Image (cartoon, rainbow, N blue to C red):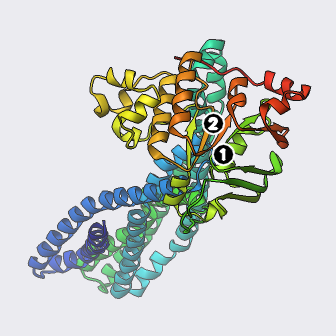
Amino acid sequence: MRGWVIVLSVAVPVEAAATLALPGLVGRAIDGGPAVLLGAVLLVGALAGAAATLAGPAVAAGTTVTLRQSLLRRILARGPVPDGPATGDLTARLVGSAADAGGALPSRITAATALLTSLGAVLGLGLLSPWLAAAFFAGVLPGVVLIRLFLRDAAQAFTRYQEVQSELAARLTGALAGLRSIHAAGAGEAETARVLAPLPRLAEAGHALWNTQRRTVWQATLLVAVVELAVLATAGRQLADGTLRPGDLAAAAGWAALGLGFFEQVEALAGVAHARAGRDRVGELLALPVPPRGSRDLPDGPGELTLIGVGVDGLLGPLDLTVPGGRTVALVGRSGSGKSLLAAVAGGLRAPSTGLVLIDGVPLADLAPDQRRSAVGYAFERPVLVGATVGEALEGAGEAETRAARADGFLARLPRGADTPSTELRLSGGELQRLGLARLLAQRPRVVILDDATSSLDLATEHQVTEALAAATAGRTRLVIAHRPGVAARADLVAWLDGGRLRALAPHTTLLADPDYRAALAAVPAPRSSV
């Protein structure tokens, strides 16, 4: 892209210089001067204009790509933080605001060149006659005020428009995610009204922008006519007095038009305001803090997971919990007790507000990214297949892993096998979970965290997968969210959560003597089977 930036930075000023020279050369030609130089300048201006036409979109596209890459890296580096922008808002900024901001450099170069062209034209008028420059400057000050007001109002209108667009995108994304529930509840009309509720504000912002442009256009048109009339009247009088030649009158007309051209660049100025609004929206994302990257290696050890004084914004803890290396701890508690939040904190998906998470004595946050991946592996209720094909999504899971996860059967039925594009898959929740488990087994982490990882499996399949997981992860530390009493019974210890607090850590058989524990276990929502 650097080459296109150079071409644009050179071509636009060269085109402007050629355009600026034309009135003087035309005047000389009228007065009997050579026309060869006029033809050469016209050719240079045409070539420079063609180069600028090619370079402008190329620079905007390249800048947009760079911005989107930076934004995506920042979003992914932040991880699944709960206090960030909504998914739809992020999408709108990645798609829309980044493209708007990408046009900033071409818009600025165009606007700055137009300004310099106007100043050069004023200089040309002054060289012909100071009176012509004075007549021109009579309309400059109102024009400057007009442009400043336009940039201010247009930038505000663009920002409001983009904000409402992001809100619409966020609402639509949420509706699409819950499409099945909306359809089942017959809430299509109500949800449509909710999603489209911001439309009046979007129209208001669009009308405000249109009114700003309309007002600026007619004011600029009137200003241009008045200033051109003043310059031409002054030049005509000086021609009658013999102060100017006929060619000078033609040059004065051309330079007056060029000098006023900046005030007619409403579209270019709107582009500057649009780019400024997009830049601000993009800048808000780029300014979001990113957790520091660790650099330590994972030492040898059994995989002991230790939480010391861990708390999360009043939702969890503070609590202390130690999962001995190679042991299994089941998380049990009523809905909303903090099980998934604790699982997220334990593996580094959510940074605690207070306290430390350690694996074999090393703070999880201090581990290098590749070491953290070797330390902790997750399997989720609804895993996402990351990769263009099934083979890429499985991340190295072979026949042994897919067989252990009971995924080999439906994978064998795929028409293109591992080369099947992920976008063509139509998998049930249980099939997705089995692919996630196969991917986890291929990762071979020291600590395994199962967050509702078998909740969509039927009882028979869950039993088979559980037995295979137990064999495949033998000797590794496991933290499991328990939805069935059998899962808690098979664990070495049960961490009983109540209202975000660790109420007890003991074997399942010991806790069964407590009626509150039995009630909490009975109140755990039953897993959903989709196989």
* In-image side of 95 versus 197 (left or right): left
Q: Are marks 1 and 2 in contact (CB under 8 Å)?
A: yes
Q: Tell which of 241 and 133 is nearer to you.
A: 133
Above or below, comparing residue 470 to residue 116 in the picture: above
Residue at 26 percent of width and 59 percent of height: 53
Residue type pointed to by label 1: Ala
Residue 229 in sight in this render = no
- Residue 155 at x, y percent in the picture: 57, 57
Residue name at image x 53 percent, y 64 percent: 368
Q: Quadrant of the N terminus?
A: bottom left
Judge whether 373 appears above or below 180 on screen: below
Badge 1: how crowded within 10 Å, few (<14), some, or many (20+)?
Answer: some
Please give the residue where the numbered disc 2 appears in the rendered image.
451
- Image quadrant where residue 293 sits: bottom right
**Marks 1 and 2, the one that precedes in the sequence:** 1
Mark 1–mark 2 Cα distance, whole angstroms, equals 9 Å
Q: Is residue 464 something one can see in this rendering?
A: yes
Task: Inspect the image, locate mark 2, and give the three-letter code of the amino acid beneath it.
Answer: Asp
Please name the residue that numbered disc 1 is placed on: 344
The residue positioned 48% from the left and 61% from the top of the image is: 272
Give the side of residue 14 with respect to residue 145, left or right: left
Q: Where residue 94 sits in the image (x, y, percent)? A: 49, 49
**Is residue 244 shown left or right of residue 144?**
left
| Rendered location of residue 296, percent (x, y) | 56, 68
Disc 2, SS: strand
Q: Nearer the viewer, residue 293 or 435?
A: 435
